[in-house]
Image (cartoon, rainbow, N blue to C red):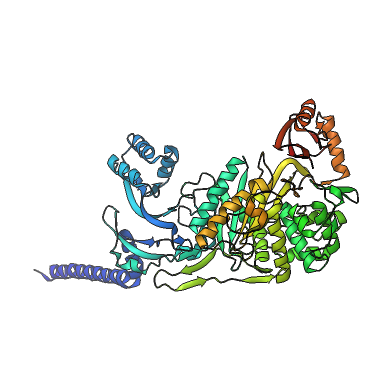
Amino acid sequence: MDAQAAKGVAFRMWIVAAALAAGLVTVAVRAVQLQVVQKDHLGGMARDQYVRPIELKPRRGVITDRNGAALAADVQADSVFVDPKDLPPDPARGPAVARLARTLGVDPGPLLRRIAVSRRFAWAKRRVTPAESAAVKALGIPGVHFVQEYKRTYPRGELAGQVLGVVGDDGEGLEGVELSLDDDLQGEAVRLDSLRDGRARALYPERGGAGRVREGARVELTLDQGLQHAAEQSLAAAVQGARARAGMAVALDPHTGEILALANAPLANPNAVRHPAELRNHAVQDAFEPGSTFKVFSVAGALEERAVGPEDSIFCENGAWRVGRHTIHDHHGLGWVTPARILAESSNVGAGKIAARLGREKLYRTYLAFGFGAPTEVGVQAEARGTVNAPRADISLATMSFGQGVTASALQITAAMAAIANDGLLLRPWLVRRVVDPADGTELLHATPTPVRRAVSPQTARTMARFLEGVVVEGTGKKARLAGWRAAGKTGTAQKADPLGGYSADKRFSSFVGFAPAEAPRVVIGVFIDEPKGDVYGGDVAAPVFKALAETALQSMGVPPSAQLPAVAKAGAPSRATPVEPEPDFPVVESAAQEAERARRAEQGGVAVPALAGLPARAALRALEQAELMGELAGSGRVESQFPRPGEVVDRGTRVRLHLAPPG
């Protein structure tokens, strides 16, 4: 090989060597870039292909009653989801999804739309029943998968449904205790890594890492499930029997403030809620004009301020009292009577005159002292405050004394009566006794009785208890008498406010609030019936529920019978001195504007109710028939009282209730 050729070969070898060297340098640089510079980024990309972080939610905490009976708990249930990439291709996809939807009882349209916009995941239905899960598995549709989640269940069904509330699909509280204590009940979730195989199927890790999941706290309520059940059943029966719109019942321990029962009717089953309104806790969240139960606090304030004495006589104007341009009426006219008789016969005139002695400012302060106009802070969301404003006129002072122009919740009224039963000391009502960490039993919350203020002195409270026992013995609350125990309480039958102004002619809010035993109270109970029909008096529709619930409570507590029972109650015979139905709550105040309204209704074809007092039953019914009205009789003898009252203009065909009593 000549020199020229050798030089060519050497040059070519140099070129190749340079190219190899350049290639090696490039590879080395790239290797450094991949292994050092972009190590974390590329490692993360690789990891994302086979690892997915998942969140393990803990079991939600159990809710129990005061004795440990479970009212709400979590159980495991299958949830069904779809991987759209693994579903059968069109045209078989549509029929397959339709079969899946039909099996799960869901609408196929929304399910198809969710699948269309999802790449790898779409819920079909969460927390299905075991029967639904088995039926879906039997379909054998590719791309349909299952994952286990916790499902909230309420083993007692409707029991305390409005108190407990409900949780959403993601396990968050939406109503009731489930919402107010959601942070405690939720527990603490943990995020873990889940491996995926080549077909992107999840390979869940061993359960070792799940031990870090903190289960939700156990919540123990003050409710007694036996008493709660009795309250709900008695209340529901009363609402149905009275064809009422709704009902509420509250039972409290007067010496601790613990809520033993908190019932609403109609009932609601949190396992199958049809509409969110079913879960409204009316006993706490609704405020209404209480009517004559408010006389208790008006008289208590007057006794406390010594504006009236226990044996003072008040002239009740024989049933009609003119205040400015207004007239206050009583259903049964009274003359000179004591405060005890005013409460027993529920005299509006008497209550108004006592309030006039007390004065506007002191009456207003009395209501505030008993907790009205402010939330009880029971711990239920959206609690009603009620409204209590200082009266500016004499007529406002009078009407407030018997519960018109003020509003309060069932819980507020019952808690105020509990202050009377607790020697005048107002306590904050409470619903949650303890919150316990299930891991180690640590108490995260331990509630204790919380005094709010002294509403009245012990002496005043005991005097009022004696007065209120008279209401049950021979007043408007006879149907609240207990078998073996002395009881005390007050009836109420309030006109409901008309949205167009004034008060409704036929809508009532009836109630009874009391305690037992009267001499040493162990339970305070408030019963409230919204818009009863037929027998609308609180003494008729609410007092029997009090009786049933109080007897159940005292028996379950093992309270011995009262040593001495009042003679009238023991004999079971009504007093001849007191009418059977003297409750005078409506219509109680008539203004010039209401007189004009009566005239307007008359012009539109209404008829005036004739005066029937003193007539025999047959003559009274004949008079009503001639006026194109219907009669409803109670008792025997001659007409002693009537509702609607004489002169009121009503629609033709209206039913007029007549109470009859023997002459003399």
Of 214 and 83, which appears nearest the observer?
214
Vertical comparison of 179 with 617: above or below: below
Quadrant of the image occupied by residue 200: bottom left
Quadrant of the image occupied by residue 297: bottom right
Q: Position of residue 533 (x, y in %)?
A: 66, 39
Of 255 and 141, which appears nearest the observer?
255
Quadrant of the image occupied by residue 15: bottom left
Query: Is residue 327 visible in the rendered structure shown here?
Result: yes
**Picture residue at 80% right of the left edge, 39% below the top:** 645
Of 435 and 347, which appears nearest the observer?
347
Q: Position of residue 399 (x, y in %)?
A: 81, 53
**Picture residue at 52% right of the left edge, 59% below the top:** 555
Horizontally, is 621 left or right of 119 in the view? Answer: right
Residue lying at the far top in this picture: please name it. 626
**Picture residue at 85% right of the left edge, 52% below the top:** 335
**Which quadrant is the C terminus positioned in?**
top right
Vertical comparison of 364 with 198: above or below: below
Horizontally, is 503 left or right of 419 in the view? Answer: right
Q: Position of residue 448 (x, y in %)?
A: 56, 72
**Which quadrant is the N terminus positioned in?**
bottom left
Residue lying at the far left in this picture: please name it. 1
